[in-house]
Amino acid sequence: MSDAKKELLALEEAGKYVFHGSGMLVGNFQPQQAYNDSLPDGESAIFASPRLEYAIFMALLNKENCPAGYHARVDNLNSGNLIYRATQESIDQLNDQIKGYVYVFHKKDFVMKNTSEWVSNKSVSMYKMFTVSKQDFDQPIRILE
């Protein structure tokens, strides 16, 4: 386990933070329109999760790491468990050299959208940023058809 993942797990355990995953270095976080299956997902916002693995998944499966295109999603079951899904074509683009970024924010700057997603409708400053790699994500990924 990387040192970044160890520190991120400690921050997750503290319960005072939410995490945002991206394939890009971001200096200034502003609300943006999110999309779910090509449809607008609510108002413009900054999305984050109290669940670290969700952010790591988003940091790795994105247009920066999948230049040929990608389709990935996280489903939140009523049980609270998350299911990570991606097409085989998306997964095949993830080599061992890919990296992404997990941004840590104070939870007090966000409001709960659901148990896995929190949002901020205003600009927020990050607390910390970590570089993550494919080796930092250890959850199963189900294949999307």
Image (spheres, rainbow, N blue to C red):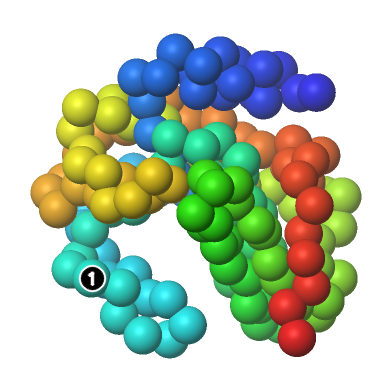
Image quarter hosting the C terminus: bottom right
Residue 20, percent from left and from top: 44, 44
Residue 65, percent from left and from top: 68, 63
Q: Nearer the viewer, residue 63 or 10?
A: 10
Task: Tell me which corner region of the image, top left, top right, bottom left or bottom right, holds residue 137.
Answer: top right
The three-letter code of the residue at mark 1 reads Gly
Outermost residue on the left side: it is 122
93 lies above or below 126: below
Is residue 75 left or right of 6 when viewed as pictured?
Answer: left
Note whether residue 104 is visible. yes
Is residue 65 left or right of 41 when viewed as pictured?
Answer: right
Note whether residue 90 is visible. no
Residue 122, percent from left and from top: 12, 49
The residue at 51%/37% (across/down) is: 51
Name the residue tied to disc 1.
42
Residue 87, percent from left and from top: 75, 77
The residue at 50%/23% (across/down) is: 12
Label 1 secondary element:
loop
65 lies above or below 10: below
Task: Tell me which corner region of the image, top left, top right, bottom left or bottom right, holds residue 69.
Answer: bottom right
